[in-house]
């Protein structure tokens, strides 16, 4: 077994006989898409594959599974134990680099220890630390899950449908303040449906639903999300879902629901993956080192730019390597992510109380 997303169980949604390769493949694909998006900045990437909605959906189903088998306090403590050491290891380097460059934090430095709010950082290091919103949102979902699961189980389908209401309220009725509290609240509201959808999958609620309403509602959510993103393009300056919470919430809901529903109804397991040894191995490593890959990928991309600048000074490299290609940047970025996985990935093993390994 291995850590599959920040602070998740070692056998996510698996039947007796090992890991669930369908969920593993989705998580690996989500990570690859995140790295590609940060390398290329494609505004349409979230429409093709809404990685964060998928990650929160998978994490929600694992959280419900854990809460069924262990006391809530033990589950929350276990999640924190798995999430925080990789963050601290990464933070030593990022905070250290910002301090060396003259940055001086106030009391908000505590958010680097437990990211209940966005950790502070300098403008110079922003590309590295701006991704921490995901860990902060994940952490809050973990803390709220014992309560959310109890509410969900009172009336599963109505609660699931109503979980889209908060983001509508925050978009149209009450504008949250532009501070740590406001951004935190907005992110929770944006991905609440996906997290609850994870509960619905775990509890067998999805498996009991008939296909027609699921497909109809999913298509309606996708249509509304896409329409809202395009209709408000002028207001936001882009149709990138990451910048438009309401569109993100509905598009993710419409996209992730069929993926979870197909799993629940048809028990998809991707047996062909085992026959493709290299691909199977890649999926395993990406899942076992998901936190490490997520935290270090932006640093890797920044370093890749610095490295490629040096390559221009070598005549042979300039002549034979596509140094001005974004794809080359992505390739160098992934090579540096691989270095980070080897150097720091073992921290995830230690956090999960497993024997540390260079490669899982």
Image: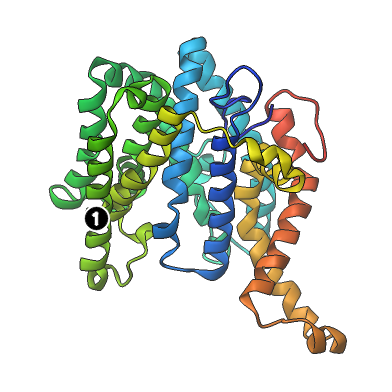
Q: Is residue 108 above or below residue 306?
A: above
Between 211 and 282, the one lying in front of the other is: 211
Q: Position of residue 198 (x, y in %)?
A: 41, 30
Q: Which quarter of the rendering shows the C terminus?
A: top right
Q: How crowded is the residue under tag 1: few (<14 C-alpha within 10 Å), some, or many (20+)?
A: some
Q: Is residue 10 above or below residue 273?
A: above
Q: Residue at x 79, y 80 (%)?
A: 311
Q: Residue at x 22, y 60 (%)?
A: 228
Q: Position of residue 309 (x, y in %)?
A: 73, 80
Where is mark 1, residue-wise? 223
Give the left or right position of residue 175, taking residue 324 as reference: left
Give the structural element (helix, strand or loop) at label 1: helix
Q: Is residue 305 above or below residue 118?
A: below
Give the left or right position of residue 44, taking residue 168 as reference: right
Q: Residue at x 74, y 51 (%)?
A: 340
Q: Position of residue 190 (x, y in %)?
A: 32, 45
Q: Is residue 239 above or below residue 133?
A: below
Between 59 and 263, the one lying in front of the other is: 263
């Amino acid at each position: 077994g291995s850590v599959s997303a920040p602070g998740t169980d070692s056998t996510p949604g698996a039947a007796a006989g090992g890991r669930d390769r369908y969920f593993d493949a989705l998580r690996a694909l989500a990570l690859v898409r995140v790295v590609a998006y940060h390398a290329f900045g494609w505004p349409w990437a979230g429409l093709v594959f809404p990685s964060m909605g998928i990650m929160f959906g998978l994490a929600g189903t694992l959280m419900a599974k854990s809460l069924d088998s262990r006391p809530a306090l033990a589950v929350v403590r276990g999640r924190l134990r798995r999430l925080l050491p990789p963050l601290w290891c990464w933070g030593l380097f990022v905070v250290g680099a910002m301090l060396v460059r003259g940055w001086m934090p106030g009391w908000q430095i505590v958010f680097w220890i437990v990211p209940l709010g966005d950790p502070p950082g300098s403008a110079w290091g922003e590309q590295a630390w701006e991704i921490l919103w995901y860990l902060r949102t994940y952490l809050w979902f973990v803390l709220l899950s014992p309560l959310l699961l109890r509410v969900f189980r009172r009336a599963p389908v109505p609660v699931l449908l109503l979980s889209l209401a908060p983001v509508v309220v925050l978009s149209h009725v009450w504008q949250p303040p532009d501070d740590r509290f406001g951004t935190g609240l907005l992110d929770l509201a944006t991905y609440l449906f996906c997290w609850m959808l994870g509960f619905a999958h775990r509890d067998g609620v999805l498996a009991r639903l008939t296909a027609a309403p699921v497909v109809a509602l999913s298509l309606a959510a996708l249509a509304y999300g896409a329409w809202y993103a395009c209709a408000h393009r002028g207001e936001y300056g882009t149709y990138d879902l990451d910048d438009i919470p309401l569109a993100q919430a509905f598009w993710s809901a419409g996209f992730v629901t069929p993926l979870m529903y197909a799993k629940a109804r048809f028990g998809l397991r991707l047996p062909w993956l085992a026959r493709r040894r290299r691909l199977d191995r890649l999926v395993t490593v990406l899942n076992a080192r998901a936190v490490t890959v997520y935290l270090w990928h932006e640093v890797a991309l920044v370093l890749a730019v610095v490295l490629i600048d040096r390559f221009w000074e070598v005549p042979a490299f300039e002549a034979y390597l596509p140094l001005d290609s974004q794809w080359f940047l992505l390739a160098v970025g992934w090579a540096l992510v691989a270095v980070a996985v080897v150097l720091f990935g073992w921290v995830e093993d230690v956090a999960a109380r497993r024997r540390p390994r260079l490669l899982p």
